[in-house]
Image (cartoon, grey):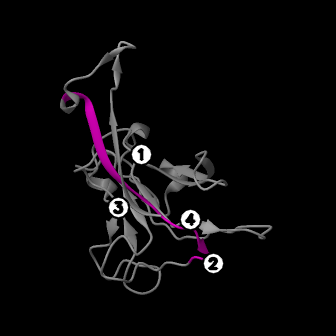
Amino acid sequence: AGTNRIVIYADALNGSAIDENRVNDTARTFYNLLSPVPGPITQNFEATTFPPTNWRVINPNSGSITWVKTPSTTVAYTGTGSAFINLYNYDVVNHLDYLVAPPMNTTGADSVFVGFWRAYRTYSTNAGDHDTLMLMISTDCGTTFPITAWKKGGNELATVAGVTGNVN
């Protein structure tokens, strides 16, 4: 558990030659492994820091819009905070952004329940412009991923009626 560094480089070029210049074919990155926590896990996103302790935001297309705490303190089911992604201004197609809860130790549990509140509205009649929200789980600490436990998109995801035409 904790922050770790991985370095990957080519060792035997074409199966035999030793690479004399690893600088041009070396990848380095940091990754963070979280220790499983005992259940239940509850999170209200009220803290000023985001993501909360032991949670992660993964934004593979770094630099673009991703998960944040709501910019308004009036947007929450209860309290003053929610997890938020600005899909209205997210104009890139087929990008994924992850809000990752800490791994939960479910040893001895016969069931696991997940509950959350969502708010979404479609702003276009073009189905290609609609977004999807998925709840993905792993039953083996991430060795295999993911199992899609819940998935809704477009009008099915919407919590209020969408528009009758495109919004400019």
Magenta-colored span: 24-41
In the rendering, at what x and y percent does residue 90 appear?
Answer: 28, 50
Residue 146 vertical position relative to residue 49 in the rendered view, above or below: above
Q: Secondary structure at mark 3?
A: loop
Mark 1, residue position = 130
Q: Closer to the observer: label 2 or label 1?
A: 2
Disc nearer the start of the sequence (2/4): 2
x then y, percent, for residue 135: 56, 56
Which one is closest to the eye, mark 2 or mark 4? 4
Image-quadrant location for residue 144: top right
Question: Label 3 to label 2, Cα distance in Å?
Answer: 23 Å
Q: Is residue 27 magenta?
A: yes
Q: Amino acid at mark 2?
A: Pro
Q: Spatial distance from mark 2 to mark 1, Cα to Cα?
A: 33 Å
Q: Give, as a three-letter code, the residue at label 1.
A: His
| Amino acid residing under circle 4 | Pro
- Determine whether the residue tagged by mark 4 lies in a helix, strand or loop: loop
Query: Which of the marked residues, 1 or 3, is nearer the chain's N terminus?
Result: 3
Q: Position of residue 71 (x, y in %)?
A: 27, 73
**What residue is shown with label 2?**
40
Q: Which of the numbered marks, if any, corresponds to residue 103?
A: 4
Which element carries disc 1, helix, strand or loop? loop
- CB atoms at circles 1 and 3 under 8 Å apart? no
How far is the residue under mark 3 from the one under mark 4?
19 Å
Mark before the other along the chain sequence, 2 or 1: 2
